[in-house]
Image: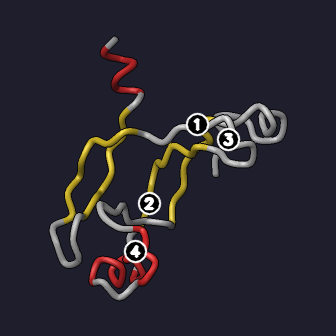
Amino acid sequence: IISNIIMMMMKAAVYSSFNGPIEVKSIPRPTLSANDDDSVIVKVLATGVCRSDWHGWKGHDDDIKKHGFPFIPGHELSGIIFETPSSLSSTLQIGTKV
């Protein structure tokens, strides 16, 4: 049971206010829904924080204002495909580096 709970969680850097602390927290990992026939879940192995992440944290980015808090920065990443819908399983294999 404990291993199932661990598999359902992930670590993420999160902030809950502009200019506020960025904390590493355990949060629920995303899952694919029945309607996600063109999405995949990527297990992030490395990510960077760039200037646009800094602007978001400072409150200069309207997208983050629309998204709301808490917010997980980072969009420049590499990892492996962790989960795919059956519609993509023949073209995108679990474990493929991305």
Q: Nearer the viewer, mark 1 or mark 2?
A: 1
Q: Which quadrant would residue 5 be assigned to in this image?
A: top left
Could you classify mark 2 by the number of other residues whose Cα lies within 10 Å: few (under 14), some (14-19), or many (20 or more)? few
Q: Which of marks 1 and 3 is nearer the N terminus?
A: 1
The kind of secondary structure element at disc 4 is helix
Q: Which percent across, then down, holds residue 71?
A: 34, 63
Q: Which residue matches tag 2? A: 47
Which label is found at residue 96? 3
Above or below for 75 versus 87: below
Q: How far apart are marks 1 and 4 (CA)?
A: 26 Å
Q: Which percent across, then down, holds residue 17?
A: 21, 71
Could you classify mark 4 by the number of other residues whose Cα lies within 10 Å: few (under 14), some (14-19), or many (20 or more)? some
Q: Which residue matches tag 4? A: 64
The amino acid marked with disc number 4 is: Ile
The kind of secondary structure element at disc 3 is loop
The amino acid marked with disc number 2 is: Thr
Q: Distance between the residues labelled 4 and 3?
A: 30 Å
Q: Are marks 3 and 2 in contact (CB under 8 Å)?
A: no
The amino acid marked with disc number 3 is: Thr
Q: Which of marks 4 and 2 is nearer the N terminus?
A: 2
The amino acid marked with disc number 1 is: Phe
The residue furthest top is 1
Q: Is residue 26 left or right of residue 93?
A: left
Q: Distance between the residues labelled 4 and 2?
A: 19 Å
Q: Which residue matches tag 1? A: 82
Q: Nearer the viewer, mark 4 or mark 3?
A: 4
Could you classify mark 1 by the number of other residues whose Cα lies within 10 Å: few (under 14), some (14-19), or many (20 or more)? some
Q: Which of marks 1 and 4 is in front?
A: 4
Q: Distance between the residues labelled 1 and 2?
A: 16 Å
